[in-house]
Image (tube, coloured by chain):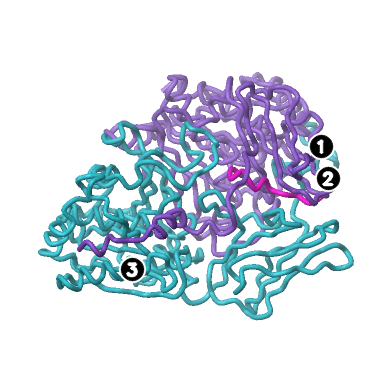
Chain colours: A purple, B cyan
Amino acid sequence: MKRLFLLTAAVMTAAVVLAQQALWGVPTMISPEVKADNTVTFRLDAPKASSVVVAGDFSPRGFELMTKDADGIWTYTTPASLAPELYSYTFYVDSLKVSDPNNVYKLRDVSTVSDIFIIGGQLADLYKVNDVPHGTVSKVWYPCSRTGNDRRMTVYTPAGYEKGDRRYPVLYLLHGMGGDENAWTELGRAAQILDNLIARGEAEPMIVVMTNGNVDMQAAPGETSAGLVAPTIQLPHTMDGTFEEAFPEVVEFVDRNYRTLPSKSARAIAGLSMGGYHSMHISKQYPDMFDYVGLFSAAIFPDKSKTSPVYADLEAKLKRQFDNAPALYWIAIGDKDFLYEANTEFRKVLDANGYPYTYYESPDGHIWKNWRIYLAKFVPQLFKRH
Amino acid sequence: MKRLFLLTAAVMTAAVVLAQQALWGVPTMISPEVKADNTVTFRLDAPKASSVVVAGDFSPRGFELMTKDADGIWTYTTPASLAPELYSYTFYVDSLKVSDPNNVYKLRDVSTVSDIFIIGGQLADLYKVNDVPHGTVSKVWYPCSRTGNDRRMTVYTPAGYEKGDRRYPVLYLLHGMGGDENAWTELGRAAQILDNLIARGEAEPMIVVMTNGNVDMQAAPGETSAGLVAPTIQLPHTMDGTFEEAFPEVVEFVDRNYRTLPSKSARAIAGLSMGGYHSMHISKQYPDMFDYVGLFSAAIFPDKSKTSPVYADLEAKLKRQFDNAPALYWIAIGDKDFLYEANTEFRKVLDANGYPYTYYESPDGHIWKNWRIYLAKFVPQLFKRH
């Protein structure tokens, strides 16, 4: 039996290979390096390059020039501490977009992959994974009679869901055009925001259901039989009423398969951009379904009343919705959002009719930074009535 | 009301911006392009580069030189059709590792991110998302008394699990050193392999539980309060007995929270490399727990009997396990694997004692290509007894 274990030192050394197939080298340096004072250093080993730029939302002007040392390492260090936030960046090496080879943390937004890092503190502490109980995140397929096939959703169930018989309220959380059922958990840090707010006692434990609002896609890019094709921004049928008409089936599926509180007072719907448009239309189309509505940088679009019966009779449907007004109708937008004016116009309509809503205005434009903030501000206001 | 919808053509044009924050441009060309004849063209727009190489497992020698056209676009087309497989690659631009900016499909293996594509056909059809019913994939946290904290596992429940009261057998599927609870679904395409084999009727519908075998990590890199730190290959306590000792708690958690068939005849355990080592030791430590055992390129390691009681008395424990022999004890390895000899020695021990097992030898070495093949070959053999 002993012979079995008389392996050579060579094999011991080879243990490092056991780590599977690290085919093409390992990181050679730390990049980005977030220091204790929240300054950040970016590094790239590119001795033959003539110019290297780091572009990202950490920079007020959107990019910074890096400098090369004698060893061919390019670096850039922020001149001051960065504010708490989830930041994304990429390198440009002689104009070629280069993903940081030393950073494995990347996020896809539509068809662009960026590197990310987090500066903690303030709201950004909600975006971090902290040492708190964690909910479960599931990728679930459900049948859709409108599209005639199975479609994919992301479902967050709060920590403790597995134990006991408790029933939970549900937030339906919708993405924007170009997004999919992964957008809120990846770019939006929804699971972290929920875990952290619930652990702090600042939000009710709740289920969060993140659908795919592009009815022409069964699921996120790469997750369907279309294969590994390049994602595109605009897809057919995103705003033709189909998604809204199919939505009651989603709610029925969730009520059937999860321990929900299946009533209006325990249901919220919110979405960003196109998802705000969907939330506005779904909540008025089914006025007895949602007591909490969130429009995040909502795409208040031109008249589509001829496209689908869902969009027709807007005035009458809003009146019906507000006859039994939602517990919360929350409108948030950035002061530089290209949809700012459209949202102002929409608020004027609500004001003129005396429909109650809450308004939250932030700096900046139509960006994920704002949608993470809006989610973090919206969730603590939910389910105060049930 | 009309005024609300009198938005300008400028806003209409801006619809493309609605697609969220496509901060840094969109893909400018198709790369990789998989053609109908299964040749593949790689493209990169890098006019200032002096040399561009595409490195990857599609190339017999591991890399190919690309050539530049008059517009500064570098291309390489494979001279012949590629065999069915999931391939990974990266570019090197003047020696700098450059992730393909036109391919959003990337996989992390330990600390390296590579671009991927799939050539369909034969076994590789199992790695694709096909138009079949899909199971649910969940990231679930469970309490571990040995480590004193919550740990994360990936759970696959087969299509149809949500409906009805049926109970299912369970495969516990373990990763290698450097891997984590995401490895089998990401690099291993486990959900696709299971979906497809079940849809074909070639495998029993089953639950698959993918744990994290690094007891010093609560979860995959980026999913713990350690933050977005660079992944490392070798962690403490991976092979000190703790994981094996804690394993019955995993099985109890799964039996309590899922509709399992909680008996030996409906349980399998398999793993790659370090996960094969874990599977070997767990299955003999708890001989009444698993009727199906799979050792994929298993790390049959030097004597660790002094490290933990789990590893002591190997001979006696193997005898006890094989006194009531598993329905299947399956050993698979590649003929170029650095662990080939160690596995040969282990098989000699089994042979000498008359312990029944099934052996599968493939070409190639210690690589994910083999582990996907082994999973695809192993799963159809499971749960024939229950």
Q: Rounded to the nearest whole Å, what is the CA distance between mark 3 and mark 2?
A: 51 Å
Instruction: Give the x, y percent position of residue B285.
Output: 19, 52
User: Circle 2 sits on which residue?
Assistant: A51
Give left or right: position of B213 versus A325.
left
User: Residue A150: which numbered mark, if any?
Assistant: none
Considering only order in the chain, which callout, 2 or 1, is on the residue closer to the N terminus?
2
Residue denoted by label 3: B378
The amino acid marked with disc number 1 is Leu
Residue density around tag 3, few if under 14, some if 14–19, many if 20 or more, within 10 Å = many
The count of marks equals 3
Q: Is residue A173 visible?
A: yes
Question: Which of pointers 3 and 1 indicates the residue nearer the eye?
Answer: 1
Q: Are marks 3 and 2 in contact (CB under 8 Å)?
A: no
Q: Residue at x 66, y 33 (%)?
A: A87
Are discs 1 and 2 less than 8 Å apart at CB?
Answer: yes
Asked if residue A102 lies in the magenta stretch, the reply is yes
Residue B36, compared with residue B187, is above or below; it is below
Q: Is residue A186 left or right of residue B190?
A: right
- Residue located at (81% from left, 49% from top): A49
Q: Chain of mark 3?
A: B
Question: Would you name the residue on which mark 1 appears?
Answer: A65
Q: Are marks 3 and 1 on the same chain?
A: no
- Assign the C terminus of chain B to one quadrant of the image: bottom left
Gap in angstroms between the C-alphas marked 1 and 2 = 8 Å
Point out the stretch of residues depicted in magenta: A95-105
Dot 1: few (<14), some (14–19), or many (≥20) neighbours within 10 Å?
A: some
Image x and y of residue B221, in percent: 49, 41
Q: What's the amino acid at mark 2? A: Ser
Q: Position of residue B282 (x, y in %)?
A: 24, 53
Is B284 placed left or right of B156 in the picture? left
Q: Secondary structure at mark 2?
A: loop
